[in-house]
Image: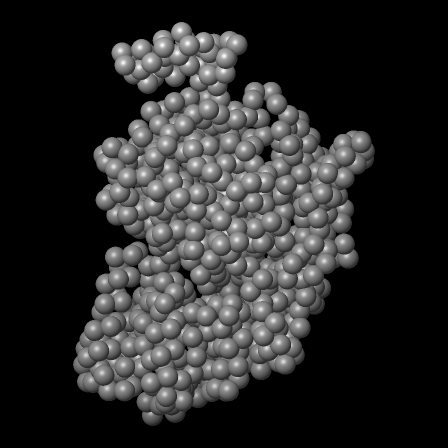
Amino acid sequence: MGGASEKERMTLRYLVSRVGIAVVAIAAICLGVSRCTGETPAGTERYEGAPVILISIDTLRADRLPAYGYTGVQTPHLDALAKESVLFENAYTHVPLTLPAHVTILTGQLPPANGVRNNIGYRYDATKHPAITAALKNAGYESGAAISAYVLRGATGLSGAFDFYDDVIGTEAGVALGTLQRPGTATMEIAKNWIGPRADRPFFFMLHLFEPHSPYAAPEPFGTRYAANPYDGEIAASDDIVGRFVEFLKAKGIYDRAVIILLSDHGEGLGDHGEDEHGVFLYREAIHVPLMVKLPKGARGGERVKEVVQLVDVAPTIASLTGVKQPEGLPGRSLLDVPAGERAASVYSETLYPRLHLGWSELRSLTDAQYQYIEAPSPELYDHTKDPREKTNILADERRVYAAMRKELEGYGKEIDAPVNISPEEAQKLAALGYIGSTQGTGDDLPDPKAHIGEFALLRRATRLTDEGRVGEALEIYRQVVAKNPKFADAWTLLAGNLEKMGRNDEAIDAYKQALKSSNVVVYEIALSLGGLFLRLNRLEEAEEHAKLALESNPAGAHSLLARVAIARGDFALAETEAKAAMADPTMKGRSAVILAQAYAKKGRVDDALKLLETTRADAKRQGVRVEQLDFARGDILATIGRVGEAEQAFREEIAGYPHNLSAYSSLAVVLVLADKGSQVDALFAEMEAKNPTRQASLVAAETYATLGDERTAALWRQKAAAAR
């Protein structure tokens, strides 16, 4: 009110009693400032107690939405939301990876500050780096989240930022952690169930959808409608989920009162600059993201902001709109405080993925309204206003711009902390086993990713060959890649997996060990894979050692493997203890419940085992996830107690869901013989071979026929196995 006179104050009091708060707000502005436009200045909006909903659509490129000018896909629900929102045309992420991007969104801190630099190997500490949910909680808000990707599981530390956190994704052997997901429709239902009872109370909810992420397999009708461009099909599927979620919010009377922020954590390469997916490069296709803010009653709906903004602005925006106090010193500001025409500060982005996984240099960049500078062994500068696809490096022509941006980037530092979840104790264990890796320093002496992206393409080709069962061909490609680049941790891991499929176990062990030595950021994943191989080879002490390597980094995975080792030793009480410990992590609950059921059965508690498996099956169906080995374990128990017909059905269900489970074929063959259906065994193993044309599959068939007393056929399968070598 500044210098308002007593008479003016009396006028305000009169207006309060006569016409209410809306007119008073306008009067206050007119009386207290030098000019009055009749509108609330940008950035002064306050909606204390308003519901706040963050919708994150993973891996969604801004330039693949109609709201940003794209015509290849129809997104009617996102279009409708955009019309009621303030849309930001030039929003950028700080890292093209899911976990660090979301931590940055929630904390308002850049990755070097919040300590989370990669999807795996780093843990978020909500006590040291409070999320916006902490400030909201102090203002009486409840917070919840439902996520669709394993890399955002609560065990990363994210659950510590929320009152409610649903991350029941499930894990599968041999499936890359970055692709583990559940359908967005299932995640949406969880969100609805949590939000519904809180419709009239202040709450913050994060709904995370993973549909545009690879592998692209949109549900119908979108899969067929966009068969020529499956990425667009997944965008259309995401749009449909958003539409149904918005309808729910409207039905509950929440939508009009809510602040809704829709964004993506990063984009997708789609072959631009040689990268199909994301994580390696920092070009616009990876860091330019959609961002829109819907205010209560659709205030300012339809506005489009051209100025550069960044995802660290999201937390300050929520704080400003709800009137809560946020930590001091955050680099961002409210998105609604950006004056038109202002030259915003450059946006910092980074990716350590090339260094930590591929043995190449990390990348950093700065992006402003006109230029993007990418720091690499061979630096790049682009004028994205004239060259939005960033095909022409103008660094040689714009030396002053290059020098200024390079100097500005130096202020962000170059240090790369070792993964925070590698404790001194774990490091000592690694060293004792001969695994010593390092992520310290900078990548000045490492290869430039753009000069080696062809190796990544080779790796993806080999992965496709493996999926097609052409394991031998894939093996040769993996060998070529690691021969060129011995620090390529992911390639060593994939090579090891292929060697396992071929039954070349000693070579697989060596490859896993090379992976462990090449990068300690993926240590727990590799250690558990190697431990699993040692278990299958009945090398139980080594399996236990490698499980214990991951106890601090991935306790659920470690306890799960230790439970299986205990079963192999006949220590069923310990197996029960370890399996229950693993079940504490929702992402491992299903698989660990299967191990617990197996321990129960071994102890003679068959009824308890079957009951647990049925409960687990029901929970998985309700949560929209699958549980590997569940039907196999059920079949195994049923066969043991003579319920052969039910056992047969269970094994067939396991094979239908997991056609690469060789043990399921073997067990089903035995059950078929017990059920006087031995004539079906040859067809069964022909099916197994068609779906798993590997040496390991041939060896399983040979062993099974030998067990059944058919040495002649067993010998034929051994010949096939020998030929596959």
The residue depicted at 22 percent of the width and 82 percent of the height is: 606
Q: Is residue 277 visible?
A: no
Q: Is residue 592 visible?
A: yes
The residue depicted at 65 percent of the width and 58 percent of the height is: 417
The picture places residue 526, in percent across and down from the top left corner, at 55, 70
Q: Is residue 269 left or right of residue 597?
A: right
The picture places residue 153, in percent across and down from the top left corner, at 43, 57
Q: How many marks?
A: 0
Q: Is residue 247 left or right of residue 389?
A: left
The residue depicted at 60 percent of the width and 62 percent of the height is: 419
The picture places residue 385, in percent across and down from the top left corner, at 64, 27
In which image quadrant can residue 357 be found? bottom right
Vertical placement of residue 114 versus 39, above or below: below
Q: Is residue 396 left or right of residue 370?
A: right
The picture places residue 203, in percent across and down from the top left corner, at 33, 41
Residue placed furthest toward the top: 7
What quarter of the picture does the C terminus occupy? bottom right
Between 329 and 704, the residue placed more toward the observer is 329
Between 66 and 454, the residue placed more toward the observer is 66
Q: Is residue 595 left or right of residue 330?
A: left
The residue depicted at 63 percent of the width and 81 percent of the height is: 432
In which image quadrant can residue 434 be found? bottom right
